[in-house]
Structures are given as structure tokens and as C-alpha cells.
Amino acid sequence: MLSIKEILDRLYKVKSPAGFEGDIAKVISAIAKENNLEYRTDAMGNVIVHRKGAGKKCLIDAHMDTIGFLATYIDEKGFVRFDTLGGFDLPDIHHVTVEFLNGTCGVISYEQKTDFKDRKVSSMFIDIGAKSEAEAKELILPGDAAVYAGELRELSNGKISAPYLDNRIGVAVALFVICSLKDCEYDVYAAFTVQEEVGLRGAKTAAYGIDADFAIVVDVTDSCDTPGFDGFGEVKMSDGAAIKIMDKAAIAHPAIVSALCETAEHEKIKYTRDIITIGGTDAGSIHTSRSGVPTGGISVPVRYIHSPCEVADMADIEASVKLLVKTLENHAVII
Ligand SMILES: [Zn+2]
């Protein structure tokens, strides 16, 4: 059985911008296979891993896509115009290195004449070093996708930094949990979904197909503890797992919130209450699937979300794993 860090390391060997999740799907499927779990890929590209049980059907969800960039046009000098896959803060993408899926690297810059306040994605471009349109098109074509270049690094005090901790962390937690569950009567499905960052799309079909009795979404949430952020939210790095109360796409079902909070209290797992005031998670698609699915979530606090250098604490990841395992093994969710 791989450790959570070993799973993260394997996930970081591949790229998975929204709409291009094939490589990470293979990594997840391989790990499921190594752990003798059933798995399949649905028509949208979601990977569904199944651990059979006699009890109610539980869906653990983690989106496996990331934000990214899509080449839209290449000019006569070989500069690449692009659009974004998912939401960005514009300052985060100034002068960063990106890598296309085929390994071609480039840097994002902007039209020099444009004032910072007037900058938009449409006034920016990717410089891949080409001297002409023809030369650029030997390397990439409009429609090719790119991601931030960067790797997983260890900081001090158990912190890690990388692009795409959103949602490599959620994938690692969900995968580790379904592989390591022991005394669990629930019939557990883990859905690793596509295209969350562009509108919670994969979760919609995954939830419909699985038809679960309840669902728990694993994702990240803003850590409100950096300078200038104090006072805007409860969730802070190193304070443990964050139990979802609400995001902009879903309000967590009270039975799931109670099960998670009571388990955390009973097992002495550090936790905070997660209220997301900007953005949603797959919970938004899942809870309104079919005739409704009671849905909650566990989020891991992350700083600088959607930047090329997100930061998280391994201790919070471990707390989230323990909370999910104990909640499912204690059969704490009463629906
Ligand atoms: Zn996410």
C-alpha cells in the first residue's frame, strides 16, 4: 500500500488540465488495480473505483482535472494566444512558465502597451521561443492545452508547495481512503471526475451513474491565515480537516456535517468548519443529481489556490484521511 505522499508523487508525474484527463485517469486506474479494486472509466472520462459492501451506497468524489490554458491562435511571429481552462486571478499568470501536454515549454507575458488594470487574458500570450507561425505550429497547434510547469516541493514544518494541490490532494486522499478502508459496510464508490474547473461537469454524470445514498466531496479550500487575509474565514492552515458547511454551489446536508463533526470530536481529529464564499465544488452537481443526494465535504486548507505555487500542510492532509476513514468505518452517516 502506497503512502499518501507516494500517491501524490505518482499523480505529479502527469498533467490533467480540464478536458485532458486521460493520463491521470491511467495513474488512478493503475493504483486501483494494484489494490485489487474494481474500476472503470465512464463516457465522460470519470474514473469510478468500487469497493463492494453490503450497506448503503457511499460516493467519495474528487475532481482529477486542474486549471490550465488552451492555445487559440498563433500569430505570424510565433506568439501563441490562449484562453483559460478554469478560473484564474490575472496577477498569478504574469511571467510564469507553462508546459504543453507534449512537453513544449513557454512563458506567459503581456502586450507591453497595456496598463496592468486593463490587462485581460486576450492581451496576453505564450512565448514558446518560435520565430514564426510555421515554426510554432511544428511544436503546438491551436487547441493544444498547457499547464503551469512546476513540481512538488517540501517546505519547512511539513508544508508542501506545487501547482495543482487543487485537487491532487483530494485525489490522493480519496484514493488512499478507498484503498485502505477495512471494516466498512458501506458500498463505497470513489469518483475521480473530469472538468470540475470549468463547471462541475464530470460529477454530474458520475453522480447520476452511481446513484449513491450519500456523498462526500474531497477538495481544497482557502486557508485564511496569510497577511491581509486574517478575519475573513475560519479555516487556517495546520488546523486540521475543514468540514464543508457551504460553498457557492451547495449547502452541505446536516446529516453529513453531523457525522463528520461527531467523528472528529470522538476521534480527536483537528477540524474547522468550511464556508466558501467564492467558488463551488463537485458537491454542487452531486447534491441535485437524480432526486437529490445528501452531500457534504472534507476540504484541505490550501494557500494561494490556482496560483503556480499553492501551499498545504501534510498534517491537514493526514487529518482529512483519518476523518474520512473513521467516518466510513464507524458508519457514522445516518441517512
Ligand atoms: Zn478543486
Image (cartoon, rainbow, N blue to C red):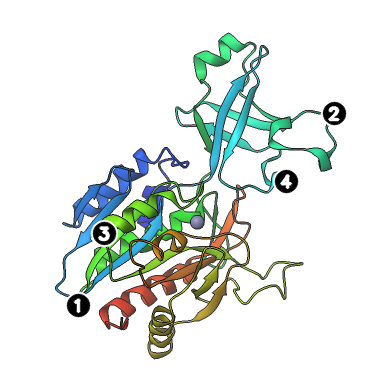
Q: Are marks 3 and 4 in contact (CB under 8 Å)?
A: no
Q: Are marks 3 and 1 in contact (CB under 8 Å)?
A: no
Mark 2 Cα shell of 10 Å, populated few (<14), some (14-19), many (≥20): few
| First reached walking from the N terminus: tag 4 or tag 2 | 4
The residue that appears at 28% across and 66% down in the rendered structure is 212
| 132, 280: nearer the viewer | 280
Which residue corresponds to mark 4? 91
Rendered image quadrant of residue 297: bottom left
Which residue corresponds to mark 3? 210
Mark 4 Cα shell of 10 Å, populated few (<14), some (14-19), many (≥20): few
Between marks 2 and 1, how big is the CA–CA gap? 63 Å
The residue at the far front in this view is 291
Q: Which quadrant is the N terminus positioned in? A: bottom left
Which of discs 2 and 3 lies nearer the camera? The answer is 3
**At which x and y percent is residue 4?**
37, 61
Which residue corresponds to mark 1? 183
Between marks 2 and 3, how big is the CA–CA gap? 52 Å
Q: Secondary structure at mark 3?
A: helix
Disc 1 under 8 Å from ligand 1? The reply is no
The residue that appears at 61% across and 30% down in the rendered structure is 82
| 13, 286: nearer the viewer | 286
Q: Secondary structure at mark 4?
A: helix
**At which x and y percent is residue 164?**
51, 50
Between marks 4 and 2, how big is the CA–CA gap? 17 Å
Mark 1 Cα shell of 10 Å, populated few (<14), some (14-19), many (≥20): few
The residue that appears at 27% across and 46% down in the rendered structure is 42
